[in-house]
Amino acid sequence: MQRRGIRRKKLSLFTYIIIFSCIASLSLLLYKELDISSGIEEILYQKDTISSVEQENKYYINKLKNEYGIMIEYGDTEKSAITSVNANVQYDINIVNNNIKIIYKALKKYPDDMFDIFKKKYSLSIILVSSFNDNNIALASKNNLNQYKIYLSNDINFERAFHHEFFHIIEYYMSDNTNYLYYSWNSYNPSGFKYQEDISKLTDEFVYNKVLSNSENQNAYFLTKYSKTSEKEDRAEMFAELMTLSKNEIYLKRNSKIYNKIIYLMNEIYENVSIKDFHFSQYIK
């Protein structure tokens, strides 16, 4: 009887040891499983976040195509074209996301009817690049197949650069459809003035200065120094400035030299592109 009792006690202790070992092992496995699961959830969350940005990019790209007839490209899809303009490919989908939203919002500043030309006759692609290997911020081009392209880098003045290049596209269209454009443009410049392509030789003479008063700007004919490089750049700079207005600037005072130049530009646009209001119409009386 005594021996059987001692044996029972030994068996019970052994059993406890086995049970304790099993519980410890299960606890360790459970902890590892929970830790692994946590890691998996974090990875899945990251993938979902990336996926949502990509989906939003596709959403806006489709809207731009359907509403405006404009294609957005980035990544390797236009790699050869990007290389040809001495630029670098944009792979960052978050930067692309921000750029696309700016473009979509900026296009709301134009009359809807002018985009019919991209839906019916002309092809316009906007290629988002990370940077240029020179001093460029953006470029516009055209070919004989009625294909227009705008290359935009991720610059702090992204929207302004977009409007500048988009005006070059507008002028390509205008040039294709009329023989008489800006025939008196130079009459709105200083007497004897000649445009200078060499940027290093440009001065501030005749350039509007926002710090100065209206009387001190009475001899201002150009909104930026870069405007003095060529007629086309002069008009594109003026257009970009007008499309990013947020208030009535002093240079919009009636009959100032710049105001008269703006009115001439606007009349050409209304006659050849659209008679409907652009963003700047609300500021110019």
Image: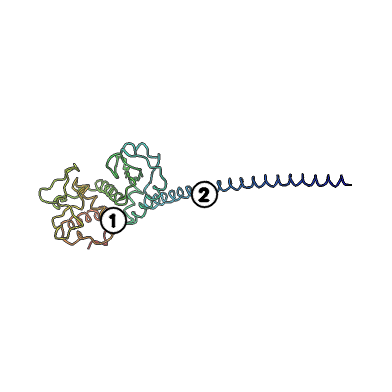
* Residue type beneath disc 1: Thr
* Residue at x-position 10% and y-position 48%: 192
Quadrant holding the C terminus: bottom left
For residue 145, what is the image quadrant? Answer: top left
Image side of residue 5 versus residue 102, left or right: right
* Residue type beneath disc 2: Tyr
Q: Residues within 10 Å of mark 1 (few under 14, many from 20)?
A: some
Residue 245 drawn at (x, y percent): 27, 58
Image side of residue 159 versus residue 209, left or right: right
Relative to 251, does residue 27 appear above or below in the rendering? above
Q: Residue tagged by mark 2?
A: 45
Label 2, secondary structure: give it.
helix
For residue 141, what is the image quadrant? Answer: top left
Residue 237 drawn at (x, y percent): 24, 50
Residue 242 drawn at (x, y percent): 25, 56
Q: CA distance from mark 2 to mark 1?
A: 38 Å
Residue lying furthest right in this view?
1
Q: Foreground residue, 157 or 265?
A: 157
Q: Residue tagged by mark 1?
A: 244
Residue lying furthest front in this view?
2
Q: Foreground residue, 138 or 66?
A: 138
